[in-house]
Amino acid sequence: MPYTYNMNSRTRVTWAALCRAMAAYFATRFQGPQAAADQPIDVSALTKQAEQGNASAQSSLGVMYARGLGVAKNDAEAVKWFRLAAAQGDALAQSSLGAMYARGLGVAKNDAEAVKWFRLAAAQGDAYAQYNLGDMYCNGEGVAKDDTEAVKWYRLAAAQGNASAQFNLGNMYSGLGVAENDAEAVKWYRLAAAQGNALAQYMLGAKYAHGLGVPEDYVEALKWFRLAADQGNAFAQFNLGVMYAEGQGVAKDDAGAVKWFRLAAAQGNASAQSSLGFMYAIGRGVAKNDAEAVKWYRLAAAQGDASAQFTLGIMYAEGRGVAKDDTEAVKWYRLAADQGNASAQFNLGNMYDRGRGVAKDDAEAVKWYRLAAEQVLEDAQYNLSRMHSLGHGTPQDFVQAYAWASIAAAGGHEQARDLRDLLSKEMTREQIAEAQAISAKF
């Protein structure tokens, strides 16, 4: 047991319990004392020592009140003892007091005051204070945002083996406060990952999956994604699902993909929700179920996932898993199109072109076809060519029509090729040359 109560209600706590509490408190914001694991703590005696001005006792007593370990949990009392020890230069207490100010526990939240105490502890080499000070600079909390200064403090903490600092330092090598360097990022992610940091394991897996800073290696990526996924990391669970779905680093296994997508989706991961919707929509790894697909697409779409918004639009347009509703389809197409989804832009243009779910509006159709066409969607390029050739929603312009038809034809669009050849019969050599010059620049 962490602690016991005797008949006189006198509390006795073991140093092992206090060490565990200190290690866990504030998610590794400070370290615990290194004492014999089985040495009991007499709270009354510790309190007496603290009242006599013993900084170590004051600091330890602060932790006990902060955690409710052997005494009733009392953040204000914890702050009191941390402050007394911190005033004597106790680095652990300074770091802890900074954490209390940073989180507004037992004292009004005050980032500037948190920075003050973190800095004092960090200057004494406290790794957790160094890490937290790096965070304050990285986020611009209590100090002006300064990525270079954040890197400095993360590096000091990381060199002492602080896994969170190692992970954050790896992130900074994306070009924040230090030159971008994937190999250096991998180095720090690996150190943190080896300590069980799930985020670092996920990022290390991503580096292997994309060959950034290390040779591309799906087997190694799978290994790190699985370690993070087993700790409940939703991003890793989603990526593990992708690897099972694609057969990357592992035998293709749709049921396995669904398993991991579902775990990540249950945590609210929008990409996993959208992917799970897709698996239900086509019946991969699970029985085909359009209603279930709509459910998951809707959850992802509500989070702003453009792919899910686009696909939900299709489900409404086709009446799959939901009553057919062109107006609702337009709504979801528009949300995805506004985020730059080319397929949604094309479909929205098509709805305006045909007057489905919205009043027919050729000019709006041209607008959305153009946006999709500029993203190299051949169907949109062909339709934009058609609108230019007919003068629908835009002045008739054979040069523009020919140019867009040529661009689409180069991508293998047969109807665009036929339209281009038809247009050439109505154009002068000069017009064709002008159109070809336009298409050549695309």
Image (tube, grey):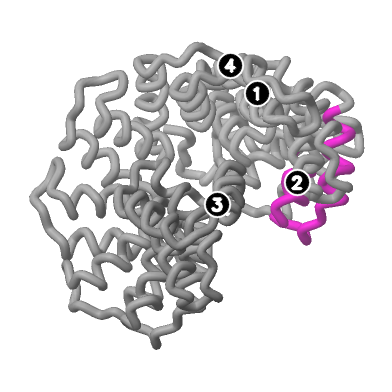
Residue that mark 3 sits on: 429
Image disc number at residue 166: 1
Q: In the displayed structure, would residue 51 be above or below residue 159?
A: below
Closer to viewer: mark 3 or mark 2: 3
Residue 309 spot, x, y in % from top left: 38, 63
| Measured Cα–Cα span from mark 3 to mark 2 | 61 Å
Q: Nearer the viewer, residue 9 or 318?
A: 318
Residue that mark 2 sits on: 139
Task: Tell me: 382 left or right of 404.
Answer: left
Numbered disc 1: secondary structure: helix
| Measured Cα–Cα span from mark 2 to mark 1 | 17 Å
Q: Nearer the viewer, residue 396 or 378?
A: 396
Q: Which residues are magenta?
A: 95-122
Numbered disc 3: secondary structure: helix
Q: Amino acid at mark 4?
A: Gly
Choose the circle earlier in sequence order: 4 or 1: 1
The reply to whether dot 3 and dot 2 touch (C-beta < 8 Å) is no
Choose the circle earlier in sequence order: 3 or 1: 1
Around disc 2, counting alpha carbons within 10 Å, would you say few (fewer than 14), some (14 to 19), or many (20 or more)?
some
Residue 68 spot, x, y in % from top left: 57, 47
Around disc 3, counting alpha carbons within 10 Å, would you say few (fewer than 14), some (14 to 19), or many (20 or more)?
few
